[in-house]
């Protein structure tokens, strides 16, 4: 047994047979370090990273509908969290919250609104979304193109719609009537993409096109040609088709007519 150090700070090292020579040496170093004073441990501040994950900065070409689609939210929910009113215009550099805000947080309205009128004693009727949903579930849809169904809806493995293979340049049709709310290449993994808003409940998407034939804001009819099939953003010619109900991907085969 031996000791080292000054009179006020003495450390004793005992010979422990169970320890190997490297282990004993390591223990000695640890004891000496402890005697030298408090060891400073670096602390990483991750608060900024957490804060960034709660927001999305609008880039050139982004739309609220496209961002909502990309992050898997209903566009109305995204608009409400950020105080954005219809027609849901966003601008480059704008920071959008993409996670639920704290309960105490009330986002400022993006447009001026008139003073609210006194509330009536009668309750306002709930919006009638059931009828619109039922219409789209039965006769409102057509197949967006012809070809072989190569991939079925399988969200557990990331397949949020169906894939239909075909020939480059063949017509891609609007599966139901509505308004084009996104047309571009800003969503990773979709190539040239079109998103059509059918009502306050349903959106549909048409991905990997070779050419887009409609512009944002255009009203399209069911069966109207909106694009040409291609392979942008993928390795084969196909149409990737999705339907989302209140922001959630649903199986398109439940809505498309049997063939």
Image (cartoon, rainbow, N blue to C red):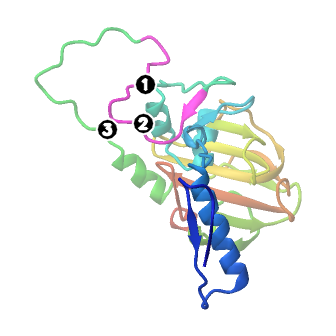
Residue that appears at 55% across and 56% down = 9
Residue that appears at 68% across and 86% down = 20
Reading the image, the residue beneath label 2 is 101
Q: Earlier in the sequence, mark 2 or mark 3?
A: 2
- Dots 1 and 2: beta carbons under 8 Å? yes
Count of all numbered marks drawn on residues in the image: 3
Horizontally, is 51 left or right of 220 in the view?
left
Residue that appears at 65% across and 37% down = 180
Taking depth in this image into account, of 135 and 109 the one nearest to the observer is 109
* Viewer-side label of 2, 3: 2
SS for tag 1?
Answer: loop
Q: Quadrant of the N terminus?
A: bottom right
Taking depth in this image into account, of 225 and 107 the one nearest to the observer is 107
Residue that appears at 62% across and 25% down = 94
The stretch drawn in magenta includes residue 97: yes
Q: Quadrant of the C terminus?
A: bottom right
Residue 60 at least partly seen: yes
Reading the image, the residue beneath label 3 is 127
Where in the figure is residue 142, as x and y percent of width and height?
A: 61, 57
The answer for how far apart the CA atoms under marks 1 and 3 are is 24 Å
Query: What is the magenta range?
Result: 95-112
- The picture quadrant where one finds residue 91 is top right
Reading the image, the residue beneath label 1 is 107
* Viewer-side label of 1, 3: 1
Taking depth in this image into account, of 47 and 96 the one nearest to the observer is 47
SS for tag 2?
Answer: loop
Mark 1 Cα within 10 Å, few/some/many (few <14, many 20+)? few
């Amino acid at each position: 047994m031996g000791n080292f150090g000054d009179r006020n700070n003495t450390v004793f090292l005992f010979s422990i047979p169970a320890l190997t020579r490297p282990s004993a040496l390591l223990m000695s170093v640890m004891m000496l370090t402890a005697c030298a004073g408090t060891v400073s441990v670096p602390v990483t501040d991750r608060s900024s990273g957490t804060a960034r994950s709660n927001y999305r900065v609008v880039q050139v070409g982004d739309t609220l509908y496209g961002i909502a689609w990309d992050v898997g939210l209903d566009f109305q929910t995204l608009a409400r969290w950020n105080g954005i009113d219809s027609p849901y215009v966003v601008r480059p550099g704008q920071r959008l919250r993409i996670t639920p805000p704290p309960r105490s947080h009330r986002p400022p309205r993006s447009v001026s609104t008139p003073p609210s009128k006194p509330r009536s004693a009668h309750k306002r009727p709930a919006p009638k979304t059931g009828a619109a949903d039922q219409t789209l579930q039965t006769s409102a849809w057509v197949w967006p193109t012809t070809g072989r169904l190569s991939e079925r809806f399988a969200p557990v493995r990331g397949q949020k719609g169906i894939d239909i293979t075909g020939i480059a340049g063949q017509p891609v049709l609007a599966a139901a009537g509505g308004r084009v709310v996104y047309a571009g290449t800003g969503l990773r993994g979709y190539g040239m993409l079109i998103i059509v808003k059918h009502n306050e409940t349903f959106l549909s998407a048409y991905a990997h096109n070779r050419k887009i034939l409609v512009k944002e804001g255009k009203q399209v009819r069911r069966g109207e040609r909106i694009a040409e099939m291609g392979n942008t953003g993928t390795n084969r010619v196909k149409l990737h088709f999705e339907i989302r109900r209140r922001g959630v991907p649903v199986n398109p085969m439940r809505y498309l007519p049997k063939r």
